[in-house]
Structures are given as structure tokens and as C-alpha cells.
Amino acid sequence: MGKRIGVLKKKRKFKKILLCDLDAFYASVEQVDNPVYRGKPVIIGGRPEARGVVSTCSYEARALGVRSALPMAKAMRLCPEGIFLPVNMNRYKEISRHVMAILGSYTPEMERVSIDEAYLAVSPGEGEQTAIAIREKIRHELGLPVSVGVSSNKLLAKIACELAKPDGWSTLWKEDVKTRLWPLSIRFLPGIGPVTEKKLNRLGVKTIGELAVFPLDSLQHLLGKTALNLHKYSKGEDDRNLETTPSLKSISEETTFARDIKDSKEMKAALMELAEGIGYRLRLQKMKARTISLKLRFSDFRTITRTISLTEATDKDSMIFQSACRLFLPLADTFPWRLVGIRASGLENFTQLSLNRGEDKEKSVTRVQDELRTRFGKEVLYRAQRLFPDSNDNPSSKNSFS
DNA sequence: TCTGGGGTCCTAGGACCC
DNA sequence: TCTGGGGTCCTAGGACCC
């Protein structure tokens, strides 16, 4: 009887899922801001002499073989006529806020995936019209191309968007799985990168269709827990919900030196800057971290991490710096170093209980510094610290490795 | 050709506790 | 004299994504 009721239950109308992804976002923003760049190979990235890589490039540059993560020096050889620009993150964030506001005006159910990408859930009848409207509105208000995929779940929406790029939109439904999903390379599935692709290729699995008919138990042997998800994906199944309010799990900053360094003093200065950056962002988020990790990359590109759990969560620059130094100490003679990073995890929300009256000197100095940083940026803060070194006498700066 | 930065999630071993 | 089993936390490394 119970089963019978289940069968009779009114069939649920499922929402449509849209994935909106701005095309070559940073490069497109630069082309909108500077019309002379339009139709030309625009390449955004770090300085080649500082070992920078390509962040994003316009489709004109892609046609010449330039790709994200390519070393800038190589991009310059591939594309000597290219327009090479530094990353102007503040500008991209500003545009991103505008884009997200437009997307949010179509539905409250939105998951922001990154600076240039978001999932939307809309009523069953509104998928295609919304895709068209969004593309027109973003083009009209901001001049930016955006691709949109429409389907019944995140996976198919994502792949539909991928297939629609650049500057298009498309759908990909469950009934299209065999004809349109299965012929695609397994690299279209989220979670399959170069390593997993190679593993699967060795088993003779190259397309999503081949993955779908591959025995699940052999797949689990090879890939563990992810096998089950991939197997579902290969059949176009995906039950992930939209995460409309994702929680932050960690905050990290890292820096690659322009040249490998050997000097512990230089390392200390770098750690200090990273610790201050992370402390600032923790306080901005009103969070404290229970775990601090140090990341080192050596000149041969070998990378190690060291982690310490604190007895009490912290948002203090000095505590983050000290923890990083403690982790670094046993490694102080393992140079030369190429990269150093600090990560704060085990994040806890906290609400400030004490008012300014009760705060100690370090706290009040930090608060003033944070305000400077928020208003004028970190370069201005550092200049102020050099001009008024007294304001920089918080305990952290007295620490050293020995 | 010499390989960024900021994230998430998974695995696996060991410590520790009951 | 031989050696449990489960749960949780911590740590290190790696794959992947944008």
C-alpha cells in the first residue's frame, strides 16, 4: 500500500539549472575598457622576469597557442605581437560584482563558483528564456560575452556551457546523453584531470561512453571513492545541490620569489608579509584559525607542507607568523627556496565580545593598520610602516628563527 | 618551455581514547 | 602471551578546479 501511494504521488517538477560562465573574463574586461584591444590577442598574467604565468587570454591569443598557466616568457615567444597586461584584480572584482548582481536578479537560488562563474536554479519553464535574457543583459550593460548552459543538473549544465563557448548558449538533456555526452572525451567530466585521464586511458577508456559501460568495481579499485561519482556523471546523473551559502574552509597566501633565495632573513620577511595578509583577511571575515600550515617549494620544484594545530584559534598576525617560523625552523638549511606560503584552516566564526576600550596595544595598532589597508591597500600600509616604524613594534616583528 | 595563486576534496598512516 | 575494533583528530601529500 505504501508503495502504491509513492507511485501515485504527484510528479515533482524539477527546476532548471543554468551555468553562466564569462568568456576569457579578464581579457574581455580589458577589451571593454580599452577598445583598441578588441579583436587582438590580449594576454593577462604575471611579469615574465618574475616567473609569471598566463592567467587568462583572449580567444585571438588562444588561436596562436597561448593558454592559461603557460609561462609568460613562452607566451611572448608564441605571440610577440600580443598585448601583455598585468592582472588588475580590483577591476575584475568590481565587474564581477555587477555581473553577479544581474544574475541574482533572475533567481535567489544562485551558487557563485568563482569570480566569473555561477549556477542558477530557475522554474522549470524558464530555462531557455533566462539564458537568452541573461546573455543580452550582460552584453548590453557591460559589453561582456557570457556563455550559458541549461539543463536539469549541474553536471549537464556545465558541459552544455562548455560546448556553447565562446559567447553562446546551449542545452544538454538527459535524453541527449548517449548521442551528445558519450562521444566526448572523459576530460569533459569535472574531477578528471591529466592524472586520472592517463589512468583511465591505460584501461582503454577515452570517451565518456566508454566510462559509462566500464565495470564499476574495477573502476573503484583504480579510483576509490571518486569512481562512483564519475560513473554517475558518465550517465548524466548528478544529484549535487546548489550551494547558495558556501562556507570558507581556509585562507592562504603564497609567493614565488623572482629568484630562488637562500637567506633566512629574506624568508622571514616573506613570512611576515604573508602572515599579515592572512591575519588581515581573517579579521575581515571575523574568523579565527586553529591550524597553520607552511608550504615550501624548492628550486627543483619539490613541494612540502608542514602543519601545526594551535591550542586556541587565532586571528593575530604575530601568532600566525610565530607558528610559521616554528614550522620553518627545522627546514632552515634546506634551501634554495622558490616559493613560500602560509595557510590558515580550521576556521571558526567568532563575534567580538570586548569593545575597543579593553583592547591591548597590539590589537589597537592592528586595527589602525587594517583600516589603512582596507582604505588604501597594502602598499600604502607598508609605506606608512616604513615612515613610522614605531607603529610596527608589535611582538611579531621581534621574533626570529633562532 | 621551466612551471602562479587561491581554493576544495580525498587518501592514508599514526596517535590516542574507549 | 598475544594482540580487538571503532572513532576521531592530526599530519602530509596529491589531484583537481578556476
Image (cartoon, coloured by chain):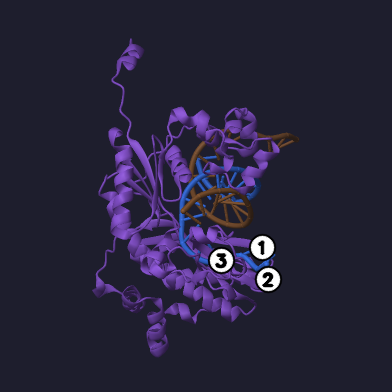
Chain colours: A purple, B blue, C brown
Quarter the N terminus of chain A occupies:
top left
Mark 2 or mark 1, which has the lower sequence index?
A: 1
What is the quadrant of residue A24 in the picture? bottom left
Mark 3 or mark 2, which has the lower sequence index?
A: 3
- Three-letter amino acid code at the position of disc 2: Thr
Few, some or many residues within 10 Å of mark 3 (<14, 14–19, 20+): many
Image height check: is A253 above or below A177?
below
Q: Say which of A294 and A359 sits in front.
A: A294
Q: Is residue A49 left or right of residue A285?
A: right
Q: The residue marked by circle 1 belongs to what chain?
A: A
Share a chain, discs 3 and 2? yes
What is the quadrant of residue A222 in the picture? top right
**Considering the numbered disc 1 on the image, is that residue within a helix, a strand or a loop?**
loop
Residue at the spot of label 1: A302
Instruction: Indicate which disc residue A53 carries.
Output: 3
- The percent coordinates of residue C12 (x first, y second) are 62, 57
- The percent coordinates of residue A108 (x first, y second) are 27, 45
Q: Which of label 3 and label 2 is nearer to you?
A: 3
Share a chain, discs 3 and 1? yes
The residue lying at 34 percent from left, 74 percent from top is: A370
Circles 3 and 2: CB distance less than 8 Å?
no
- The percent coordinates of residue A77 (x first, y second) are 62, 69
Quarter the C terminus of chain A occupies:
bottom right
State the CA–CA distance, disc 2 to disc 1.
11 Å
Q: Could you tell me if residue A333 is visible in this image?
A: yes
- The percent coordinates of residue A201 (x first, y second) are 67, 39
Q: Please identify the residue farthest to the top as the structure is shown.
A: A1
- Three-letter amino acid code at the position of disc 1: Arg
Circles 2 and 1: CB distance less than 8 Å?
no
